[in-house]
Amino acid sequence: MAKKRIVVKIGSSLLTNKNGGLSESKLNEHADALAYLKKQGHEVILISSGAVAAGFSELGYPSRPVTLAGKQATAAVGQGLLVQAYTKTLKDHGIVAAQLLLTRNNFGNQAQYSNVYSTLTELLKRSVLPIINENDSVAVDELTFGDNDMLSALVSGLVHADFLIMLTDINGVYKSNPNVDSTAKRYDFLPAITDELFRYTKNKSSSKVGTGGMTSKLSAAQTALSLGVPAFVGTGSGEEKLMHIVNGHGDGTYIGDSSTHNLKKPEQWIAFHSSISGKIEVDEGAEQAIISHGKSLLPAGTKAFEGVFDAGDVVEIINSEKAVIGKGQVNYSSEDLSAVKGMASETAMRKTDRHRPEVIHRDRLILTLREENAL
């Protein structure tokens, strides 16, 4: 089998004992499986929950704390315990582990986003196994990913992973809750994530220590697919469980396949992490050129704009009906665009003393998912 780059996400319920503390035996089994997968020649990145669950008993809490201060203090203690346990077991297999703690802000800032990519790439090049978690001890609501399911999807896209494995306490995606419906049908394979699936899986996770239920995993899988990464949601046991999943014999649901295209790193940042600084309205000709022919946006096709922005900012692209058809990173400030909108390319270049005319180059332009699916 060819070497693959695989992101594995492990939820809190798979790492803790019945009292909510860190289960050494469970963690060791996961570490053994990660090591086995790596020894088969694959590159592996771990997204691991469990910091809060591992730390609350150490601080004297009877159960997972509900206050923000309690959660963050617990995470600060638990993260060290979690990574220490992984590092020890992986070292027994001759594998070096590394820790990365991320917040949404690391993805929203383009320079930091590129740095995360560079760090992960170098670690994988050095045969290190990165262990990633959200930086729960300092993150605030507006800077969180929501849960580690979404973090795992975004990381899998960033590193151009071949596969995303989300291990959970339910063996796959069901049409109804298997905990209350013994006749619930499991999907062994899903080509895509539909709105109907979200309606089926609104039930919460059975776990008392995790934050992401099945709906969260479907959202993450949908994001991973949009980034060109197929996913698996399910469970397993033993040293070879991850290898079984990679070989197509996992106990769960396989979602999507490898036929979808990967978005380049700059496109991912624009699509999922950038802030919107304004809007540019385009005429019908420019709309068709962008959607149907993959062209850049030129000054001639620009009708109007909203907002104040600088070159390098990200704006939405709207049509004459004010519908968003995409977004992209502009080469003109709003002040410069005001002077050249509607002009022919040669005239715009002379007026602004530029060598290239594009308002938004195709390589920095992302269509909405709706428009992508219509092609």
Image (spheres, rainbow, N blue to C red):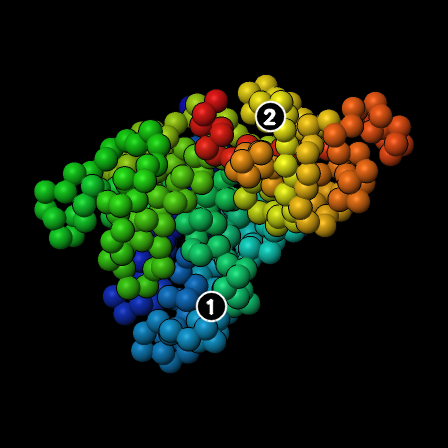
Q: Position of residue 40 (x, y in %)?
A: 43, 32
Question: In the drawing, what numbered circle is on residue 352?
Answer: none
Which quadrant of the structure image shows residue 192? top left
Reply above or below: 99 against 372.
below
Q: Amino acid at mark 2?
A: Glu
Q: CA distance from mark 2 to mark 1?
A: 52 Å
> 358 and 145: which one is in front?
358
* Element under disc 1: helix
> 362 and 6: which one is in front?
362
Q: Residue at x 58, y 37 (%)?
A: 318
- The answer to whether any part of residue 81 appears in the image is no
Question: In the drawing, what numbered circle is on residue 75?
Answer: 1
Query: Mark 2: few, some, or many residues within 10 Å (few <14, many ≥20)?
Result: some
Query: Mark 1: few, some, or many residues within 10 Å (few <14, many ≥20)?
Result: many
Q: Is residue 293 left or right of residue 41?
A: right
Q: Position of residue 263 (x, y in %)?
A: 55, 32
Q: Amino acid at mark 1?
A: Ala
* Element under disc 2: helix
Which quadrant of the structure image shows residue 81? bottom left
Disc 2 target residue = 284
Q: Is residue 51 left or right of residue 328?
A: left
Q: Position of residue 306 (x, y in %)?
A: 67, 46
Q: Which quarter of the figure is the N terminus placed in? A: top left
Q: Nearer the viewer, mark 2 or mark 1?
A: 2
Q: Is residue 172 left or right of residue 259?
A: left
Sequence-wise, which precedes: disc 2 or disc 1?
Answer: 1
Farthest residue, direction left: 183
Q: Residue at x 79, y 24 (%)?
A: 345
Reply above or below: 54 against 371.
below
Q: Residue at x 30, y 44 (%)?
A: 198
Q: Position of residue 106 (x, y in %)?
A: 61, 53
> 224 and 9: which one is in front?
224
